[in-house]
Image (cartoon, rainbow, N blue to C red):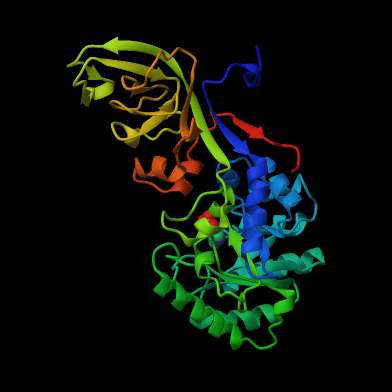
Amino acid sequence: MMPSAQLPRRCWAEIDLAALERNLKLIRASLPPGIRYVAVVKADAYGHGLPQTAARLMHAGADLFAVANIAEAMAIRELSADWPILLLSAVLPDEDKYLAEHALAATVSSADEVQRFDAVGRAAGRPIDIHLKVDTGMGRLGVWHEQAAALYAQIRAASGVRLAGIFTHFASADEDPVFTAEQRRIFVALLAQLPGLDPTSLFIHADNSAGLETTPGHGGVFNAARVGLLQFGVLPHPNSLLARVRTEPVFSFHTRVGLVKELPAGTGVSYGRTHTLRRPTRVAILTAGYGDGIARACSNRGAVLIHGRRCPILGRVCMDQTIVDLTDVPGEVRCGEPVVLVGRQNGAEISVAEFSAWSDTIPWETLCSVTKRVPRLYRNAAGV
Ligand SMILES: Cc1ncc(COP(=O)(O)O)c(C=O)c1O
């Protein structure tokens, strides 16, 4: 059987690794001096492909990788035996041993976790690196800030763990600067009351992409930022001040025309006949559907680019096919021609944010929802 990598493409994503590298450098240049770069590459690097993305971010000088789980960390370990890695999600008890085996830093939120990791570090004869996470109002992982000083004292007394970082996470950095400032204030006040804290030996971090909009110009006590979405060239919200950083999209999403045909006015289109043609219509049947990552919620809402023109989606998106209106595209459109779902074509653009809005979701989810059927093609794989 022919390997699928050699077959013609029906739906694919293009990942521009040179843009990723430029983005990291632009973000770094926009930050106060001395801020270390924590590259958030969980969920297969937001769907971009973890090994390829992490390798390029290493080349670009990421200081630390943040992932969700051990499997993701081990994918990075295949690239580098010692590049620092932080697990952002809770570690399960049967995963503890991998912290020592693969030199992974764990997020700590509780006394129980300190005891577990302390035991693992003592048994291994080498302390486990931990980042103490403080809940300043996210209501997810982290020790509640009022109990953080006690947990800090417990960590200092445990010989099997080494405090490598302290951090918090913002709940609404993209929409509530007042609450974000309050979370920042609580965190900074806590740091000031922790005895023996040596910021030079720790990663002290809070900002995700949206948080960077409100980073104090001098960095304050913070010496690291955890960047996910922005490094992929997507803004955390439409009016983001981070537009000034001028990152570029790394991801684009493509399919092709499978069939062109004319249908009479009054015809119902696709499952459920949720769209009825108001005029004689030239339609294109595309070779991608929700089985590839075009959300079914884009039915009758979204559009695609063909010859640089916007063509509305007609009726329901199907598993492998999507129907669009070609009537207003001048000239002939042929079977096999390229279609842009997300990205640029002849000066027109559909952004990840716009594509996401059609299905009432956010760019983070869209990027994670391109399915494994869709090959990722890596552009500019050689270093810049
Ligand atoms: C704890 C934590 N830090 C940082 C990030 C990165 O956020 P963003 O993609 O908005 O930069 C995430 C993303 O979900 C996260 O969960």
Q: Going 58% across and 17% down the picture, which residue do you hit?
A: 8
Which image quadrant: the N terminus? top right
Which image quadrant: the C terminus? top right
Furthest-right residue in view?
125
Q: In this rendered view, identify the residue nearer to me: 125 or 268.
A: 268
- Give the answer, above or below, for where 63 lies relative to 216: above
- Give the answer, above or below, for where 334 lies relative to 95: above
Residue 30 x/y as whole percent:
61, 63
Can residue 345 be seen from the camera position used here?
yes
Q: Going 36% across and 25% down the picture, which residue do you hit?
A: 318
Residue 264, by quadrant, is top left
Residue 359, by quadrant, is top left
Q: Going 62% across and 76% down the picture, which residue do you hit?
A: 218
Can residue 292 be seen from the camera position used here?
no
Q: Going 27% across and 22% down the picture, which residue do you hit?
A: 271
Residue 11 x/y as whole percent:
51, 25
Q: In this rendered view, identify the residue nearer to me: 22 or 58.
A: 22
Left or right, 140 with respect to 225, comes to: left
Residue 255 x/y as whole percent:
49, 25
Q: How many marks?
A: 0
- Give the answer, above or below, for where 116 lies relative to 228: below
Residue 37 x/y as whole percent:
67, 61
